[in-house]
């Protein structure tokens, strides 16, 4: 895309300098360096059949979305590694893959709902910082940057209210990605770092007792409870406005979260999976994780432990960079090391951790880190955890193997 824009831009600038010649029709790019220096004089730019080069043709400059940006990224996602599609993803002419579950572009009511939800969620960050719930934003400098983020993001949301196509097709994934970009613009890479560390420490302290409780269960009952724990753990999401109060107060625990799960028969095929896993051993599973703390430690890890006990190789896939309270691959490596101290089942080379190559709460399965794709190419079970990755995106995703979406 960037190469096309650069070539097209160079072509038009050259055409403005001098009328077209047969060489241009053959795709020969003019030397536009003189033209850029002084367009009004429109110098006679020589065209040759050998391709000439200029800075404009070969490089694209990303502009920041904020005048006083620190990061000056000007892009929603960035990753220096090679990105490839998940091997198990079905993406054909008959069954095309689209990450976004809902295209908000032509849905005015949905647009209004989600923009309003983002506005409420963003305004709540200042209250969290003032209450001390965000240790990373307690000092005056960070508090000031947080205020700048709130102002910047709300400004863009206001623009989207009146011009929904300002930044291309609108989706929940795009709105969440824009939020992360605005955080980076003001120099806030990981505002939930302190929260994640505290919640992870507490969850790992509770892990031994939970594993003991699970081991004491009937073998027929165990898989279903493990799925319930994954769902309960996923409620520890600081991106959910309705749960922030309970999370900030520390009044939400795994048992209470489990009691709050609403089971919808039309969306619940857990019984089918339980029956399947009791009769079939998977060769390899790739598990896309979501939040840090209780989500990954008390929800995902016990489920992964069960798979390991079934002699299933497991690849844990986590964000390559921070987003909300989502766990990153580096943080997950540390969590797994600590889990190995707690329980011997985790002390195996059948368990590995990879970065997804993404930096947002949602997931585009066409663009994953090449190492993750290579490591999980033999997986016959795909597990996706979290609202962002399994509901707002990938809800309709189909795979060439068994899949499980938990949110």
Image (cartoon, rainbow, N blue to C red):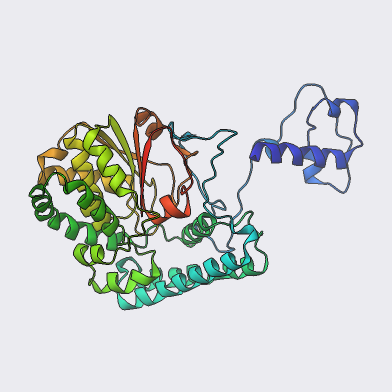
The residue depicted at 14 percent of the width and 36 percent of the height is 347
Instruction: Where is residue 329? Give x, y as percent.
Output: 32, 45
Position above or below: 84 against 239: above
Instruction: Where is residue 6? Give x, y as percent.
Output: 70, 39
Left or right of 163? Residue 255 is left
Left or right of 27? Residue 293 is left
Location of residue 307 (image quadrant): top left
Instruction: Where is residue 259? Give x, y as percent.
Output: 24, 66
The residue depicted at 73 percent of the width and 36 percent of the height is 7
Position above or below: 70 against 14: below
Location of residue 272 (image quadrant): top left
Task: Pick the quarter of the image with the C terminus.
Answer: bottom left
Q: Which of 351 and 309 is in front in this view?
A: 309
Whether residue 391 is visible to the viewer of this picture, yes or no, is yes
Q: Nearer the viewer, residue 372 or 80?
A: 372
| Furthest residue toward top | 50
Left or right of 334? Residue 388 is right
Instruction: Where is residue 371? Give x, y as percent.
Output: 38, 32
The residue depicted at 35 percent of the width and 32 percent of the height is 376
Whether residue 335 is visible to the viewer of this picture, yes or no, is no
Q: How many labels does the image show?
A: 0
The residue depicted at 79 percent of the width and 37 percent of the height is 11
Position above or below: 158 against 348: below
Left or right of 103? Residue 27 is right
Task: Pick the quarter of the image with the N terminus.
Answer: top right
């Amino acid at each position: 895309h960037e190469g096309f824009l650069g070539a097209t831009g160079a072509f038009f600038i050259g055409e403005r300098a001098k009328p077209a010649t047969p060489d241009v029709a053959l795709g020969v790019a003019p030397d536009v360096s003189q033209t850029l220096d002084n367009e009004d004089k429109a110098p006679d730019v020589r065209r040759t059949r050998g391709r000439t080069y200029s800075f404009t043709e070969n490089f694209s400059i990303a502009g920041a979305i904020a005048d006083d940006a620190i990061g000056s990224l000007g892009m929603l996602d960035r990753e220096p590694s090679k990105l490839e599609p998940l091997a198990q993803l079905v993406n054909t002419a008959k069954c095309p893959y689209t990450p976004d579950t809902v295209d908000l572009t032509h849905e005015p009511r949905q647009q209004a709902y989600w923009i309003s939800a983002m506005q409420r969620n963003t305004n709540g960050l200042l209250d969290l910082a003032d209450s001390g719930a965000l240790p990373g934003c307690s000092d005056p400098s960070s508090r000031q940057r947080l205020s700048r983020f709130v102002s910047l993001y709300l400004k863009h949301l206001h623009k989207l209210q009146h011009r929904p196509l300002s930044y291309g097709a609108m989706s929940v994934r795009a709105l969440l990605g824009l939020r992360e970009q605005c955080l980076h613009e003001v120099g806030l890479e990981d505002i939930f770092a302190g929260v994640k560390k505290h919640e992870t420490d507490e969850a790992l302290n509770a892990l031994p007792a939970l594993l003991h409780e699970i081991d004491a269960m009937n073998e027929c009952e165990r898989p279903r409870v493990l799925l319930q724990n994954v769902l309960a753990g996923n409620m520890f999401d600081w991106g959910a406005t309705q749960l922030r109060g309970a999370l900030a107060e520390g009044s939400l625990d795994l048992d209470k979260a489990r009691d709050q799960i609403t089971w919808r028969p039309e969306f619940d095929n857990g019984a089918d999976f339980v029956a399947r896993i009791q009769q079939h051993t998977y060769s390899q599973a790739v598990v896309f994780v979501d939040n840090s703390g209780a989500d990954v430690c008390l929800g995902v890890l016990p489920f992964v432990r069960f798979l390991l006990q079934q002699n299933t190789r497991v690849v844990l896939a986590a964000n390559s960079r921070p987003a909300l309270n989502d766990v990153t691959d580096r943080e997950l490596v540390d969590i797994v090391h600590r889990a190995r101290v707690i329980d011997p089942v985790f002390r195996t080379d059948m368990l590995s951790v990879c970065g997804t190559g993404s930096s947002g709460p949602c997931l585009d399965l066409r663009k994953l880190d090449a190492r993750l794709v290579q490591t999980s190419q033999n997986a016959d079970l795909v597990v996706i955890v979290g609202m962002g990755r399994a509901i707002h995106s990938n809800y309709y995703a189909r795979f060439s193997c068994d899949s499980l979406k938990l949110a």
